Structures are given as C-alpha cells and as structure tokens.
Amino acid sequence: MPDADASALLLVSGKVRSDADFVFYNQPAHSSGAIRHEGKRTAGGRVTDTLLVDLTRVESAIETIVLAASSDGGAFGQVPGLYIEVQDTTQGSPVARFDNPGATTETAFVLGEFYRRQGAWKFRAVGQGYSSGLEGLATDYGITVDEPQQAAPAPTPAAAPVAAPSAYTPPPPPPAAPPAAPPEPVRLTKVTLTKAAPSVSLTKQGGTSGTLHVNLNWQVRKQFSGWSSKFGRPAAMHSDLDLDLCALYELTDGSKGVVQALGNAFGALHQPPYIHLDGDDRTGAVSTGENLTVNLDRKNAFRRILVFVTIYEGARSFADLNATVTLQPQHGAPVEFFLDECTVPSPVCALALITNTGGDLVVQREARYLVPERGVSPQRTVDYAYGWGMNWTPGRK
C-alpha cells in the first residue's frame, strides 16, 4: 500500500510567499509557530498523519491554509478510507470530517482548507486531485522544487593548437563577484525503512557532512488500564511517563560508551563521542521530543552507533505506545520508520544501528523490543543483545 503524507500551504492571493510557507515532512514547522507537522501514528491498522494548526498564531497576511495529502509508492486508488478530520484540541472532539471516495490515479489531493471570512476562520472541503504528486501540487502554489540534475553533455574536444610567435598577453581582468546564490529549493524526497527494505546508505542520500538529527516522536494509542490502576487516563497526560532516547557508541579508536539522560551522560558534539543528547521529553511532543545529534563531519571516527529507547518510569512496557523514528541529515533526504506494536513486556527497544562501512554510514532499522532478565537493566540488556561488552553501574537522573 502506498505511503500517504499530510502537508499544509499558507497562501496569500492563492500562492505561497516563499518556500517557507510549505509545511511537510521535510520542513515540519512554520516559522510563525502556527503550523507543525506532527508525524504519523499507527493504530488498529490505520495510519494517521497529523498537522497541528494554531489559528491564533497565523500571520495576518495569510488568507488561506491549504490542507493536502500526497502518496508515495502508488496512487490514492490503492489507499482505502482516505479522509480529513478537523479536531478541536481543547475539547478532543472532531469539528469536521470529509471522506474522499473514488480516488483512482491521483497521487496528491487538496482535501480541505481554512480561509478567512469576515475576520473569522472557516473550513471547507475541497477534494481536488493531482496525478503529478506532491511536486505538481507544490509547484501549483508557487513552490520551487528541487529536481535531479542531469549530467551536462561532454564538451567537444578542442582542435590542436597551432604554434604562433610569442607575444605579450596582458593579464585578464579580475573575475566579477559571483551573483548571490538563489534560495535552496525544497527537497521533496524521503526514505521510509520497512521490514522488506530495512537499510539505507546516508552517502547515497547526500548525508555526508554536517549533522544527523535523530528524533523519537511518540504518543499513547489507548489507556493503560491493563498496566496499573493509576493509569486511568492516557499516559500522555501524566508527567510520570518518561521515555529516554539513548545511544551506544563504539569509535574507531576502540573507545565505547553510552549517551543518555541517566547519569547526565549527554555526550558532546564537537569532541568524542561526537554525539549529543539535547532533550529529555516527558510528553512525546515532537517540538521538544527526544533528540540526538550526530556530527557527520566526524563520521570516520565512528565504528557503530546503536540508537535505542528505554522507559525510565511511568510504565512497564511499550504496549499501547505509538512511535515514529526520524533521522534527518543536514544535507540529504530524511529517513523514517515506525515501530511495530509491542506484544511482549519490554521496557527497552533497539531502534536503529548505524555502522561505518568503508567510510559510508549505513542506517539499519532494528525496531527490536527486548525483555530484560530479572535484575538486568535495560541498558545492559541492549549491550548483551548487540555485543558491546561494557561494564555498567547504577545511575540516576
């Protein structure tokens, strides 16, 4: 089944003011803070992609907010049950819903839009389809799209020079200053790792320098009544629920360690281990979620990195939690994957293994839930499973 992605465009007179007015998986937040792409959740066999819109923060110049969807890997005729639902987050209840039946060869849809009328925001369903995908939809609203560059034809060989009497040749004038570079076009590509296609080369995706940003975004699928009587409402409302994004690392000089909030082992970006943890999220909100940053300018220092997540407190298992992992290179296409539903009493999950293969960093989707033996910590359990061979001592935040 094709993958479907939500997006939003902020319009003035029917067009974006710049590429920054396009919010989607590669550009997940508007500079005004009015719109944020929250990412996908899977529950009960249904995938939900969420856009969070704060109408009170929309700039006064914006007249319309287009809500769209695009498919990757096939047409919407292969996606059953496509619809858009507008919810009031303060009440947690739907305000409007539009089902879009009868899709065939379309690969992008404008599903609905917010528009200003007499000083108030209104919503209406649209249902306009495109057979040219996200690129066609985006360019229709004024977005500059990054296109693959074609190789230039080989130059015609110059004729052999003819000897001539030597003469004084004045030096050429200094070159003119190069014109300012145009804004970088929007990159629409992404990579989704699955069980069938679990790995990708960062080099082939253009991620050879700068930083690699790893984000864990999660939310509760349903109530936790089966775990403990105190969880009578969704755990996302409880400050006690604390997931920790961590990384085991092994460098080419043989040094090993862990980057995690436990023990304040937050790492460092510009000195070993060249990995830094910059957040300890207790809510699952994508804007402040669990984040690791890897210095790709030091990629030759890495032998392998294992990104994993533990439940520090608030639950005993990952059951009923939805999670999306996104690896965003500073240069190159983002890599994302979803965690399968947890069916074992696991408080720790190996997310992704990054290995240095001949100078190329390869990302391998693990999505592996582990069950510690009695008296064994989640960190030590991951160590045993992947043969890191470290010595562990108790730690606290």
Image (tube, helix red, strand yellow):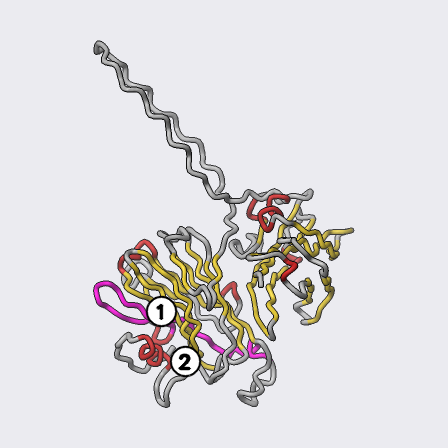
Q: Nearer the viewer, residue 299 or 204?
A: 204
Q: Position of residue 171 (x, y in %)?
A: 28, 18
Magenta highlight range: 234-261
Q: Are marks 1 and 2 in contact (CB under 8 Å)?
A: no
Q: Residue visible at 35% across and 81% down? A: 381
The residue that appears at 30% across and 60% down in the rendered structure is 357
Residue that mark 2 sits on: 370
Q: Is residue 387 above or below residue 207?
A: below
Q: Earlier in the sequence, mark 1 or mark 2?
A: 1
Q: Nearer the viewer, residue 328 or 165?
A: 165
Q: Where's residue 84, x and y in %? A: 68, 62
Disc ID at residue 306: 1
Mark 1 crowdedness (10 Å alpha carbons): few <14, some 14-19, many ≥20: many
Residue 354 placement: quadrant: bottom left
Quadrant of res 237:
bottom right
Q: Name above or below for residue 52 compared with residue 318.
A: above
Membership of 253 in magenta stretch? yes
Q: Amino acid at mark 1?
A: Leu
Residue 369's disc is: none
**Would you call the spot at circle 2 few (<14 residues within 10 Å), some (14-19), or many (20 or more)?**
some
In the image, residue 345 lies at what x, y percent? 46, 85
Element under label 1?
strand
Q: Residue at x 35, y 77 (%)?
A: 382
Q: Residue at x 72, y 52 (%)?
A: 115
